[in-house]
Image (cartoon, grey):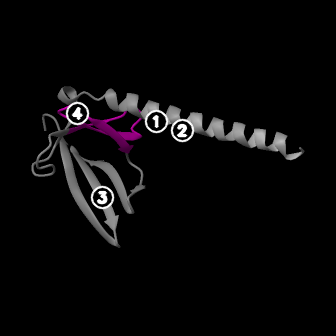
Amino acid sequence: MRCIPGIGVVALLGLSFNSSALATIKDEFQRAQACDYYNAEYVSDVGVYKDSKVRFCISADQQELIYVMAMGTSWVVPFNRQYRSKGILSLNTLEENRLVLYQKEDGVVTRKVLGRQRGS
């Protein structure tokens, strides 16, 4: 009987962590939806995406890079800071008017120009 209040506290903590995670996903979704394909500041470079038309926006706080496809699908990744996805270390950054992706896999770093600023 003594451990029942402890279980309740642990369950409440679990719920609070869960609800904050859902809020983050919802916020990310809303930010991704804010990037309009036709008004995106950066367009994909030739040959980067063979079958898909992708454009990019950088969030107002410059913390996130938003990918948006012509069909409306969009997703958010960190901007100007390293992140790991599927075992690959990545960094999205700006160099002059170019949007550049650096990736490190198995000790090898690659550089790919994702896109260029419109009108440049």
* Mark in the foreground, 4 or 2: 2
* Mark in the foreground, 4 or 1: 1
N-terminal of the pair, mark 4 or mark 2, is 2
Residue in the image at 13% along x and 34% along y? 119
Amino acid type for the residue under numbered disc 2: Ala
| Distance between the alpha carbons at the discs numbered 2 and 1 | 6 Å
Is label 4 in contact with label 1 (beta carbons under 8 Å)?
no
| Predominant secondary structure, magenta span | strand
Region rendered in magenta: 55-78
| Distance between the alpha carbons at the discs numbered 4 and 2 | 29 Å
Where residue 41 is drawn, which disc sits there? 4
| SS category of the residue bearing label 2 | helix
> Which residue has dot 1 on it?
25
Residue closest to the eye, 68 or 116: 68
Q: Position of residue 77 (x, y in %)?
A: 37, 44
> Which residue has dot 2 on it?
21
N-terminal of the pair, mark 4 or mark 3, is 4
- The question of residue 16 being in magenta is answered with no
| Distance between the alpha carbons at the discs numbered 3 and 2 | 28 Å
Where residue 102 is drawn, which disc sits there? 3
| SS category of the residue bearing label 4 | loop
N-terminal of the pair, mark 3 or mark 2, is 2
N-terminal of the pair, mark 4 or mark 1, is 1
